[in-house]
Image (cartoon, rainbow, N blue to C red):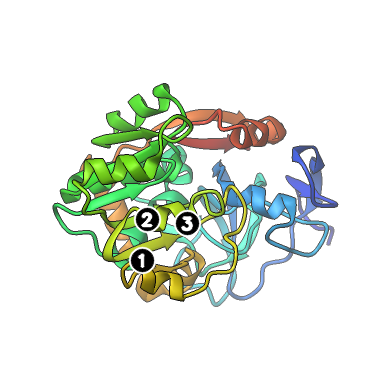
Amino acid sequence: MAAEKTKAIRIARTGGPEVMEWVEVDLPALGPKDVRVKHHAVGLNYIDVYFRTGLYQQPMPGVLGMEGAGVVEAVGEQVTYVKPGDRVAYAGKPPGAYAQVRVMPQDTLVKLPDAISFEQGAAMMLQGLTVQYLLHDSYAVKPGDYVLFHAAAGGVGTFACQWLKAMGANIIGTVGSPEKAELAKSYGCQHTILYRQEDFVKRVQEITDGKGCAVVYDSVGKDTFLKSLDCLRPRGTMVVYGNSSGPVDPVDVGLLAGKGSLRLTRPTLMTYVHDRSLLEPMAADLFKQVIDGKIKVEINQRYDLANVVQAHQDLEARRTTGSTILLP
């Protein structure tokens, strides 16, 4: 029997956005724990750039895309979490969401509540689950904590500002323009810093009366890491969860002692989503925040999946805000 076909993005080599090609591919046969999902929407995230450029390596030809939402078309005989016809969403490995239809392991799939649309599901899973573990596990934010969040107007940042506001935190966000400052404030960020014009360490010290922040959340990496440490209070926590400016240089752990017995962690969502005992309560918490209206999923950009080259160009040029989805 001939393999079923679908259209998907593939890369034959790593590089710029132009290496992505919209091609017809064979769908693999279902394994015993596999699920075939027809996508209604796919999420765009900076981790997709890391895979495309080769910062995160994979065999070639390569696939891209870490989150999506759609309907289950078929399941393997040992699948227990979902059934055909279920509305589902997911975020996490293996990559391959840039496709009309895909076959994937059941592990990262969760049922999508009827109150949440496919577009919302595709836009919220990776960013929303990331924020859930950042604010509750990497550091447990408490009411009144001063929190510095880099890229506060980005996809993760806008989720974080809303959730932090609901938790009663004092939010300081770095942004790249006055327009992005207004956007971050609209999501609950009380203090914004234009990092291209202002010394963010100095501004943080002014805002906190010299006490520093309980935690810094940094997805920028190389360009901000050392200065971010200077924004922390003694025994504060530095959370590096991305590296849009490049990987952080090797760290002398003595630096953490000299700056006030600081804590440093480098978490990834992948640690959480393949453990159902962690994933399911995280997803339930995220869905509740959205359904209760505490977090609004703002989709500010939509692109056809076939036009993903333009989407990546806009993402890397920092022309996007909030969440972006790709439509198969």
Per the image, the residue denoted by label 2 is 230
The answer to whether the residues at label 1 and label 2 have Cβ atoms under 8 Å apart is yes
Residue at 34% x, 33% y is 184
Image quarter (top left, top right, bottom left or bottom right) of the N terminus: bottom right
Numbered circles on residues, count: 3
Residue kind at label 2, given as amino acid type: Asp
State whether residue 15 is above or below residue 265: above
Per the image, the residue denoted by label 1 is 259
Residue kind at label 3, given as amino acid type: Leu
Mark 3: secondary structure: helix
Per the image, the residue denoted by label 3 is 226
| Label 1 – label 2 distance at C-alpha | 7 Å
Residue 317 is situated, as x and y percent measured from the top left of the image, at 62, 32
| Label 3 – label 2 distance at C-alpha | 7 Å
Q: How crowded is mark 1: few (under 14 residues within 10 Å), some or many (20 or more)?
A: some
Residue 172 is situated, as x and y percent measured from the top left of the image, at 29, 42
